[in-house]
Amino acid sequence: MPEKPQTVSPFVIYLFLVIGLLSAVAFRLLTIVNSFSPELLRPLWYFGVIGYILFFAFRYHISEKRKRTIRENRLLEKIEGSAPLGREEREQLAYVLSSIVKSKENINYLFIFALSLLAVAADLLLAVTGH
């Protein structure tokens, strides 16, 4: 019998959210740091890359876990069909839906979008002012 899938703890969810956000900040600061402290460029870049490696490996794992649960248990077919759902299928669907609802990926996407706009604006301002 396959292991019952469970969502990760809120601590782990927020830990990886922070790792993703800090990595996004690091990448968006690269052009600004390069203008004022070029010696910090490489450490900041490594910080961002390593953070993204951890963050996206975690997100990949979660995404694959959701897909595996759906595929292995034929949940989509069962929902689309007329067959009644048993207790196990309901638990598996609850896991998938709970995992999506608990995810903070939308915060990360919004943060990266806003930071990217700010980074472009800051770089253009630095270019215009000669830094």
Image: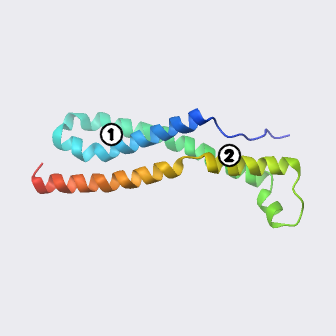
Residue plotted at (24% across, 34% down): 40
Going by the numbered disc 1, the residue's amino acid type is Trp
Disc 2 residue type (three-letter): Lys
Describe residue 31's horizontal placement relative to residue 90 as left or right.
left
Where is mark 2, residue-wise? 65
Pointer 2 local density, CA inside 10 Å: few below 14, some 14–19, many at least 20: some
Residue 42 coordinates in the image, percent (x, y): 28, 36
Q: Residue 74 in the image: x percent, y percent?
A: 80, 56
Q: Position of residue 22 (x, y in %)?
A: 40, 39
Q: Nearer the viewer, residue 126 or 3?
A: 126
Disc 2 secondary structure class: helix
Which one is in front, 113 or 37? 113
Q: Quadrant of the N terminus?
A: top right
Tell how many labels. 2
Q: Say which quarter of the image contains residue 125.
A: bottom left
Q: Residue at x 27, y 56 (%)?
A: 120
Q: Which mark is residue 45?
A: 1
Can you say whether 10 is above or below 99 in the image?
above
Distance, label 2 to label 1, CA atoms, is 30 Å
| Residue occupying the far bottom of the picture | 81
> Taking 112 as reference, is 49 above or below it?
above
Q: Secondary structure at mark 1?
A: helix
Q: Earlier in the sequence, mark 2 or mark 1?
A: 1
Q: Residue furthest left?
A: 130
For mark 1, does the 10 Å Cα neighbourhood hold few (<14), some (14 to 19), or many (20 or more) residues? some
Q: Answer with left or right where residue 53 lies relative to residue 116.
A: right
Residue depicted at x 78% and y 48%: 92
Image coordinates of residue 36 in percent, x first then y, are 16, 40
Quarter-wise, where is residue 33 in the image? top left
Q: Are marks 2 and 1 in contact (CB under 8 Å)?
A: no
